[in-house]
Image: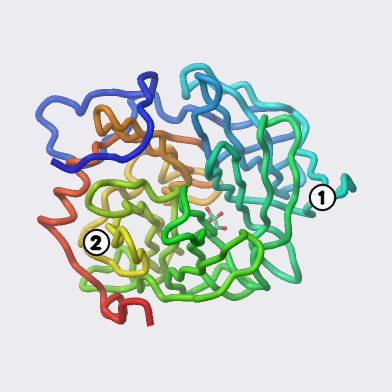
Amino acid sequence: MAKIIGKSLKNIPWQERPSGSTDVVWRDTNNPIIGWNPIKNVARMFNSAVVPFNGSFAGVFRGDTKNGKPHLYVGFSSDGLKWDIDETPIVWRDEKGELYQPSYAYDPRVIEIDGIFYIVWCTEFYGASLGFGMTKDFKTFTRLENLCIPFNRNGVLFPRKVNDKYLLLSRPSDSGHTPFGDIFMSKSYDLKYWGEHRHVMAKGGSGWWQATKIGGGPAPIETDEGWLLIYHGVSGTCNGFVYSFGAALLDKNEPSKVLYRTKNYLLTPEKEYETVGFVPNVAFPCATLHDSDTGKIAIYYGAADTYVAVAYTTVELLIGEMKENCELVSGDELLGN
Ligand code: BMA
């Protein structure tokens, strides 16, 4: 039986799979957990990241303000479902203490490495690129060097070094709503200088749900069988893009190698809060909470670029599904080249 390697999280938000259901991933029945106009000046909160913090939970939220621009907000919760979110965007200072605010910021991921919470987001740097910063207490936030040159999005760090190096997944792109994109990996000794770039996963396959582009979602979860990556896959329709999500298992020691990958999506927009909103038909995962004792996983995803929603699965169900209905995509087999 597959096991999560990591901390236990007894207070993980959780609902059992509905009786009679054979779904690998099921939604919280109280979704969405954050709705329209959640705080002053913010119209929509979605594509946000949460982590266990001091016995409860903290999060970095994407808030699209009432002038349409997105910024990052910090929030706290005792149960992971009801959130108290600051009304002022996060203030970033550089390592010398000078203000260093991004002109816009979206799709944050928060990754704890050795007690420090690193935040990766999509920032303005001559086009969309990867902003980077850290906090220890979710009160003061230090902005670090941008992780790469333009254009790039969906930056995700692994939660520990592998073979002495930090690992970053990213999705190189162009300046707009990219009509292409595969997931790549870069390595670093210090989180500042990045190299040894590798291709990880290609879009496409026999199905259409991930035919247009893919992008890393929550920070990979370490398991005894490899790194579990939940990622989004995009399908192009005559009415625009549709964002669903699937999962892959990456090699423990060389995570640019894909071992298994879900042939079918795990969740696609079906509920009204996923199909109707500012951008219809989007399910965009950015974080998980997980419990190593039970294998429970809570997936936080943005819905319709409007809401925050939660869905549940277990490590056993997810890896089981990947093995039973696996399809590697042409390009994955280049194995790190
Ligand atoms: C992507 C990103 C996401 C967004 C998605 C759907 O390109 O901008 O923030 O959720 O489009 O609009």
On screen, 102 above or below 308? Answer: below
Extreme-front residue of the structure = 164
Q: Quadrant of ligand 1?
A: bottom right
Front in this rendered view, residue 113 or 49: 113
Amino acid type, label 1: Asp
Quadrant of the frame with the C terminus: bottom left
The kind of secondary structure element at disc 1 is: loop
Q: Position of residue 65 (x, y in %)?
A: 72, 41
Residue in the picture at 32% in, 53% down: 227
Left or right: 65 with respect to 275?
Answer: right
Q: Position of residue 143 (x, y in %)?
A: 75, 50
Left or right: 242 with respect to 70?
Answer: left
- Looking at the rendering, which quadrant does residue 97 occupy? top right
The kind of secondary structure element at disc 2 is: strand
Per the rendering, the mark at residue 94 is 1
Q: Say few, some or many: other residues with alpha carbon within 10 Å of mark 1 (under 14 / 14 to 19 / 20 or more).
A: some
Q: Is mark 2 within 8 Å of ligand 1?
A: no
| Label whose residue precedes the other's in the sequence (2 or 1) | 1
Residue in the picture at 76% in, 71% down: 126
Q: Position of residue 287 (x, y in %)?
A: 46, 42
Residue in the picture at 54% in, 41% down: 114
Extreme-right residue of the structure = 98
Per the rendering, the mark at residue 11 is none
Per the rendering, the mark at residue 261 is 2
- Comparing labels 2 and 1, the label whose residue is closer to the camera: 1
- Looking at the rendering, which quadrant does residue 252 occupy? bottom left
- Report how far apart the C-alphas of labels 2 and 1 lie in the structure: 39 Å
Amino acid type, label 2: Arg
Q: Is residue 129 visible?
A: no
Residue in the picture at 30% in, 75% down: 332
